[in-house]
Amino acid sequence: MKRQKIINIAVIAHVDAGKSTLVDAFLNQSGVFRENETVADCVMDSDDIERERGITIYSKNCSVMHEDIKINIVDTPGHADFSSEVERIMKTVDTVILLVDSAEGPMPQTRFVLKKSLEQGIVPILLINKIDKKDARIKEVVDEVYELFMDLYATDKQLDFPILYGIARQGIVVYDPDDVKDIDVFEKGTKKKKNVAGEGGLDITPLFDTIIRHCSFYPDVVSEPLQLQISSLGYDDYIGRLGIGRVTKGIISEATEVLLCRGDGIREKRKINQVFVYRGMKRAAVSSAQCGDIVVISGISDISIGDTICDEKSPSPMEMINIQEPTLSMDFIVNKSPFAGKSGKYVTSRHIKERLFRELEINVGLTVEETDSTDVFKVSGRGELHLSVLIENMRREGYELAVSKPEVIMKKGEKGEKLEPFEELIISVPEGYAGAVISKLNIRKGIMTEMISENGYSKINYILPTRGLLGYRTEFINDTRGEGTMVRSFKCFDRYKGEIPGRTNGVAIAQEPGIATSYALFNIQERATLFIEPGTKVYEGMIIGVTARAEDMVVNPSKAKKSTNMRASGSDDALKLSPAKKMTLEEALEFIENDELVEIVPDDIRLRKKYLKELERRRKGNVTKNR
């Protein structure tokens, strides 16, 4: 049986380096879309949260045709919290396109994804993107990439990687950056693209040609027994759990019996129902697929990452895919506040449990553990963003729940010592703010590894415990007046560094249920920054603001001014309130302490104390001052 020529590639990079934009160029220039079809930017980022935040969260597949060659493309996340999506797809590809920003150079996540590809013996293709930037430093960035390869112990073959240059948003890739020197990216005074991809020979053809030269094809004849390892999971409401992976040997056909080999040595006979392949952005059902292709299979309800599907007569299981363990956990708790059940559709422990275990079907970087309480589930992930995306999805689906402060997951070393996760932090701040940032990070047990100052900015590298970064982002934004950038990535587990100081401010706690009034909030705002506005419904124990002092204080935000028949000049004028500080989900998770919870409902995010009544808090040792 003659085999179709197939190449599998992945696009890997740091956040905002242009991965999804490059995939757009692949699709646009391969005739995937009709001429009259409306196509959104970053079309692969189809999830609502991905579009809102401008980041890739889930690894996705598509395919394009170039001449007679099918190219399967995997768009991978660039944020360290979703690195489990990257780890598992490296075995499915022939090469990776390493995308690096021409000004920023290699970043922490660049190191992580490159390391994973080098471990698989892959020789990457380097694409320096955004070469039209005014602050582009192309030669220096290429040198930095070479240094990174050497730091990661790349082989001589891997060091001999091809280098291309491009402007992904224009759909342009060239062999020499001088080829685009005379090109205006936009017409003067407009945001209209002047150079339509493909005009004057400026398109991504050099990238296609390099991929084809760089990758070797499978033998023309398909004769070996079937071998397919599952590298990703999907779910369909009609056909159930889906396994996604690359056919490394043989042919896989629909409605056939196979042998499922698991990592624990168990081998079971199973039947495959349907086989799908990717054609453009869509999944197409086929009767069979050949080795080299990335397929989606249905029919095995308990299929998992790393399982190998083999021929019954000659099984050859592959080595399991290792996924790094979670580093952060938090408790997901049934919402028991006085406002519970007023806006959510799914509010019981049964609903939350079913949703969390359904998430495990596709989210392999997540773990869920049941606790002694039927109303509490311990959920662990790769970082705050990883967990907050799950919470946000649940909120939008109509779930109500409360979550605790994130806590790092400790481990024991070989000698029984206590180990905790550490992260690499790269910060870029105006030089005037560097002192404040360094001071805060030193207090949080950070160790500076490098500091470079140029063009009025300081680039600072730190290694510090993950615990030290909990709650730091908001402080960082305030200390740098919003002008600093902070990028973090998991580094390793190392010895426990001792206590790290937490939040230094107390909170303002509602004394009784009611509706917040302007009169009460006007008096409270002198002592606290408010989280609520007049007309907000509150309950006892709800956090309505943050105080300037270390102690908590109990206040009455629903207190009304007593009516009299006397009017004092000036005192009854309209009260002017400062704008309330609206907390995002990530900010709320960073803000809370161990005795507090974030209450999440479809139409709001509230902060509260674990124990709502003041007497309960006093008994638990959390003494609040009544003012």
Image: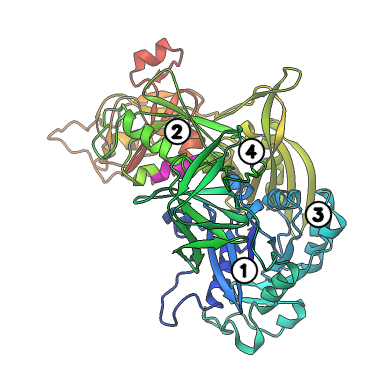
Where disc 4 sits, the SS reads: loop
Where disc 2 sits, the SS reads: strand
Q: Main secondary structure of the magenta part?
A: helix
Which residue bears the numbered disc 4?
324
Which residue bears the numbered disc 1?
3
In the image, residue 367 sits, relative to residue 124, either above or below, namely above
Snapshot quadrant of residue 494: top right
Marks 4 and 2 sit apart, C-alpha to C-alpha, by 37 Å
Q: Are marks 4 and 1 in contact (CB under 8 Å)?
A: no
N-term-proximal mark, 3 vs 4: 3
Magenta highlight on residue 191:
no
Mark closer to the observer (3, 1):
1
Which residue bears the numbered disc 2?
546
N-term-proximal mark, 4 vs 1: 1
N-term-proximal mark, 4 vs 2: 4
Q: Residue at x 57, y 74 (%)?
A: 65
Which residues are drawn in magenta? 387-393
